[in-house]
Image (tube, grey):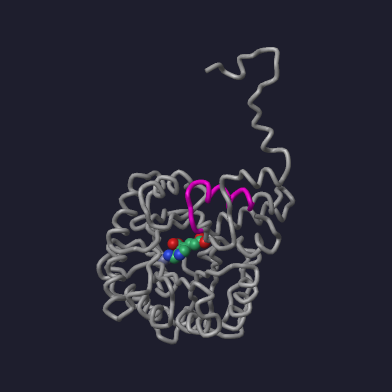
Amino acid sequence: MTDPRSDLGRASRVRPRRLRTTPALRALVAETRVSAAQLVMPHFVLGSRAAREPIAALPGIDRVGQDALLRDVEADLALGIRAVLLFGLVDDARKDARGRASAAARGPIATAVAALKRRFGAELVVITDVCLCAYTDHGHCGVLAGERIANDASLAPLSRMAVAHADAGADLVAPSDMMDGRVGALRDALDARGHVETGILSYAVKYASAYYGPFREAAHSAPAHGDRQSYQMDLRNVREALKEARLDAAEGADMLMVKPALAYLDVIRAVKQATELPLAAYNVSGEYAMVKAAAERGWIDEARVVRENLHALARAGADVLITYHARDALRGGWL
Ligand code: PBG
Ligand code: ZN
């Protein structure tokens, strides 16, 4: 074989630019596509039906009561967003050391899930976050034994929370607490209640990250003391991500997640290669807030940066993209 470029004095025969000539040609040969069907829109759900409150650090995202939630989801469905991830919020007065309100049959999430399923039925995939931090007075994701987060004692309350969401009609429950063994515990609890069809989207690979800052403001879920480093993953590790992914798959997870997303593209790729389960990437609150802040100042082109970021996640291997940008990206035709 002769190297086509060795024919000096003559332009190359091999010209990658030919396939970049027009938008239609570029689209024809694009290796990665991001479509509405892959997107999941997160929602922060309040107990009071009529509420709608802006979140300062997440411009464009509100905390919503059930009425506003139904309106937002209906509009998003018209854009093509067919999956939601719900986070429940309760007043401080309803928080306690064990996060009991998390499993309430009439709590904000159970109520919202039932309402969404009544209105939209099988048109909408309803995923619920399962974690105690927005319901405990100390703000940790599990229950405490002294200053420590007690792993095994946290599994029962988490399981009760998942069962309450499944009772209400959730399609998938998504444990984000990072206790060991919680996927298996949730699977057993769901099956024992007859919810054999309710799936588990595990936040299998969740790092202790500064990128969750705006979320903790949105959900009032910041730990009152200490941090989450004894249960969330160390940012320096990737082999450990494979271990977490393998364990959760073995415990019965139906889908896996890597979180955050953009600073962990290598992890998304590695987990993708190690599992046959669908893989979600969570483009978290801090990643969203940084784009919004720079765009507000006119420092970046929001549409193009969002398109670039979401394609990066898909290119790294994410099948499902959980992102606060979902609505804007579709409404603006940014993809
Ligand atoms: C609760 C939870 C968090 C996020 C999702 N579920 C916060 C945390 O672990 O502190 C973060 C989502 C985001 O930043 O957008 N465990
Ligand atoms: Zn938590």
Q: From the viewer's perspective, is residue 81 above or below residue 208?
A: below
Asked whether 89 or 277 is in front, the reply is 277
Q: Is residue 203 left or right of residue 44?
A: left
Residue 208: which quarter of the image?
bottom left
Q: How many marks?
A: 0
Q: Quadrant of ligand 2?
A: bottom left
Q: From the viewer's perspective, is residue 50 above or below residue 62?
A: below
Q: Residue at x 63, y 79 (%)?
A: 71
Q: Extreme front residue here?
A: 1
Q: Position of residue 79 (x, y in %)?
A: 65, 68
Camera sees residue 168 = yes
Question: Would you say residue 92 sits in the magenta stretch?
Answer: no
Q: Position of residue 268 (x, y in %)?
A: 44, 49
Q: Position of residue 84 (x, y in %)?
A: 52, 70
Q: Position of residue 246 (x, y in %)?
A: 31, 53
Q: From the viewer's perspective, is residue 197 above or below residue 24?
A: below
Q: Is residue 159 left or right of residue 332?
A: left
Q: Residue at x 36, y 52 (%)?
A: 275
Camera sees residue 147 = no
Residue 279: which quarter of the image?
bottom left
Question: Would you say residue 314 sits in the magenta stretch?
Answer: yes
Asked whether 181 or 275 is in front, the reply is 275
Q: Is residue 223 left or right of residue 190?
A: right
The residues colored magenta run 306-320
Main SS type for the magenta part? helix
Residue 14: which quarter of the image?
top right
The quadrant of the picture occupied by the C terminus is bottom right
Q: Residue at x 26, y 72 (%)?
A: 188
Asked whether 155 or 231 is in front, the reply is 155
